[in-house]
Image (cartoon, grey):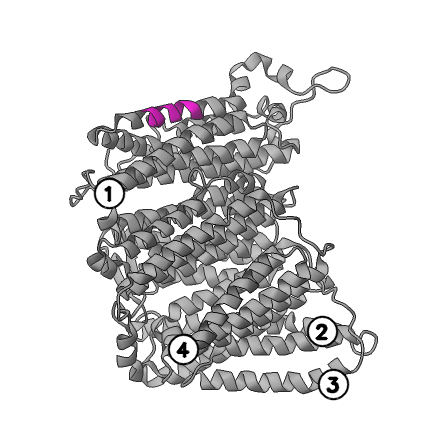
Amino acid sequence: MTVLLPGLVLLPLIAGGFAALFRQQGRWITLATGLGMLVMLVLLSIDAWGVGQYQGLWTLGGWERPLAIAWYLDDLAHLMLLLVGLVSLAIMAYAWFDTETSDHFWGLWLGGWGAMNALLLSSDLFNIYVTIELLGLVAVALVALSTKAGAAAAAMRYLIISLTGSMFFLLGVALIYGQYGRLDLIGLAEVVEHNWVTHLAWSIMLLGLLAKTAAWPLHGWLPLAHGRAPTAASALLSALVIKASFYLMWRFGVGPFAALSNELIAMLLALLGTMAIFWGSWRAWKTPLLKELIAWSTVAQIGYLLIGLAILFNPQSILTVSEQFNPSLLLFWLIAAHALTKAGLFLVAGNLILLTHSYQLKDQLAVLCNSPLTLWTLGLGSVALAGLPLTLGFIGKWWLIESSVALGQFWLLAPLILGGVFTLAYMGRLLQPAFEQRLLCQYAPKQSDGRPAECISERQLAWPLLAVPFILVLSVWVLALFPLYPWGATL
Amino acid sequence: MIIVDLLLALTIVLVAARCLYTSNLAESVVMFIVFGLLLSLVWVRLYAPDTALAEVAIGAGLAGALLLATLSQLHLTHAAKATAMARISLIIPVLLGGALGVSLLSLVQPAPGLSDLVMNNITQSGVEHPVTAVLLNYRAWDTALELAILMWAWAAQRALGPNLAWHGVRLQGLVLVYFSRLMVPLLALVAGYVLWQGAYAPGGAFQAGALLATAFILAFIVQQAQLGQANPAVIRRFIHHWAVKLLWLGGLLAFFVVGLAGLLLGYGFMGYAPAYAGALILAIEIAATFSIALILAALFTGEGRRYE
């Protein structure tokens, strides 16, 4: 193992430590770190394309499993590292130009990035606990950075949920160690058997992780926290942080605890996912606030991911991995589509709020009537979020539909297809005026004397603030066009 | 002994309940500290003296001091009455406790674990004490990340607001001054001893760091009490001097530098050359002790007005 894999974890942690301590220099430290991380991610990807020498198991400290902590790099971990890296870089580029970015942001998120990379690589139960603890701490602090009314209360609520989730996870880890005397995921996969302790441990770990992912009905904290956090923080939390705990459920469910999966747990997850889609969409349809709409949409989109998890956990599913094609990786593209789109949408929402100084949905028309790029970003983003054909989300959703049919679970077609329609409906609340072009500026808020208020142009903003979300959203379309070899998603 | 254990268990539950359900916040904090002290006794009874030391120094001592400092900044002394929802939610820990109780009955005996592997490799680990071997050698990566958590706990506290200035009660009288003149050097000495003995007996960087942090905090409180005499907040300024701030990261940096050196020399990432393992572990522990002490003390003192 050369320094590449440790570097991906150590660089952001060390740089983040310096950026947190010396805040005035924070953004420059971040710039240098971001470039370094980009180089390492490119090198790692070039290697995966050819030799693949980094893929596989690494034990730390020169000891053997199960004494040592193990890292494991496979296609999924690699793709997640790339996703986290690229989305982080895009959001940090946006934050660089956002005048409201706090000095604290840089050090905090560099720590979060390091924690995410450590989590994605780890193949050891207790080590994973340590990484989610670090990530959770950063996530709560990012929410608390906001000066918006109610942000502190939202952060407190998030902290309590997040810590409770971590404690449940840790309790499960302790039970597993008590039962099997080892913590490495690969070794556990060989010894795990059906008994009361293991089922209890896996259940409470799953419960903790579901709460941290904001799965229905444990989602209550998410719209508050993601709705009130600063722009860049909302984007990071919705795009990446909740995916970390989802990734762990995926990893554990098909790894060490695969033997415990049954149709009951799959059915339960599918039900939670269905409820999340319906309830999240309904609340997004009703909310008067811009960022809460996008946050509720995250609750709904997590529903899709849960249905994906249900399919992975169903013992009847056919998930044969051939040399070139790993069907379960299609779920990753759903994660990626949501991460890229949602990051873009939260950043656009940040732009709108910067221009209108209002969090209300109805006040945003003043900008939309005179801002083509913002409108395009929102339009492309809404369609991508709905997962229509030609977008990345469609690859994942098609797999969900296909698998549901193959399993005979026809009722799942209802949430899977209706969810997309709902997405267009609630995003249409923002876009609908745009379709009625002629009326646009008449819809804009009136001044006190009855004349239409002047439209606010997006040109007041620095161009990177407009470009970054547009590129993020566009990438969901462009990525869907290219064959995604070598990661099992050739179309 | 079984009677002592039962009494201990019963008292802990009662203290915890009192801590949660009293409306007087000061009483709640004091109960939390008592809870931590009792819990450390439980660890002693479970033959886990390392955990007991950490619990008493950090769980009861420093967490208690932080809670008291927080309390002094709140403009309320009583918590809101528990809602009906809060009472109903009590059912969750009860259910969980029941499930855990049942699972205790079916745990494998004798407990499987990695103790044999830990002891078999201990001659190559560089230390004699198995807990230190696990924390600083076999699972050093966990400990490095724990130091990162401490660092980011501080960063998170700073992110909450401009400053948490100490508004504690103005302490009067000379007793505290003389007491701290005696205690501060003594605490530093004991911290050094606890650090050193970690190689072959319970102790180590976290406990030593917490003791050293206590010395800083005690000196800081006395400084605050002696307003007008000494230069106020000289301790706080010392902790936040840019050169001292580099020491905050010292523990993390030492882990990472040694970890990368191990990688380049062929012992694997976070690996030590067995011949130098003892010395490297001691070096990391010294750096970590200072990091832990400074960050814990900074959590208590806040940054001061300079940064507002």
* Residue A365 spot, x, y in % from top left: 60, 23
* Protein chain holding label 4: B
Q: Earlier in the sequence, mark 3 or mark 4?
A: 4
* Protein chain holding label 2: B
Q: Amino acid at mark 4?
A: Tyr
**Magenta highlight: main SS:** helix
Q: Earlier in the sequence, mark 3 or mark 2?
A: 3
Marks 1, 3: nearer the viewer: 1
**Toward which corner of the image does residue A147 lie, by quadrant?**
top right
Q: Which residues are magenta?
A: A414-423
Q: Say whether mark 4 and mark 1 are on the same chain.
A: no
Judging by the rendered image, the residue that carries numbered circle 1 is: A262
Judging by the rendered image, the residue that carries numbered circle 2 is: B221
* Residue A306 spot, x, y in % from top left: 35, 38
Q: Nearer the viewer, residue A289 or A410?
A: A410
In the image, A386: left or right of B116?
Answer: right
Judging by the rendered image, the residue that carries numbered circle 3 is: B178
Find out whether the residues at labels 1 and 3 contact each other: C-beta distance under 8 Å: no
**Toward which corner of the image does residue A433 lie, by quadrant?**
top right
Q: Amino acid at mark 1?
A: Asn
Judging by the rendered image, the residue that carries numbered circle 4 is: B47
Task: Tell me the distance, in whole angstroms, between the alpha carbons under discs 3 and 4.
Answer: 37 Å
Task: Tell me the distance, in whole angstroms, between the alpha carbons under discs 3 and 2.
Answer: 13 Å
Task: Tell me the distance, in whole angstroms, between the alpha carbons under discs 1 and 4.
Answer: 40 Å
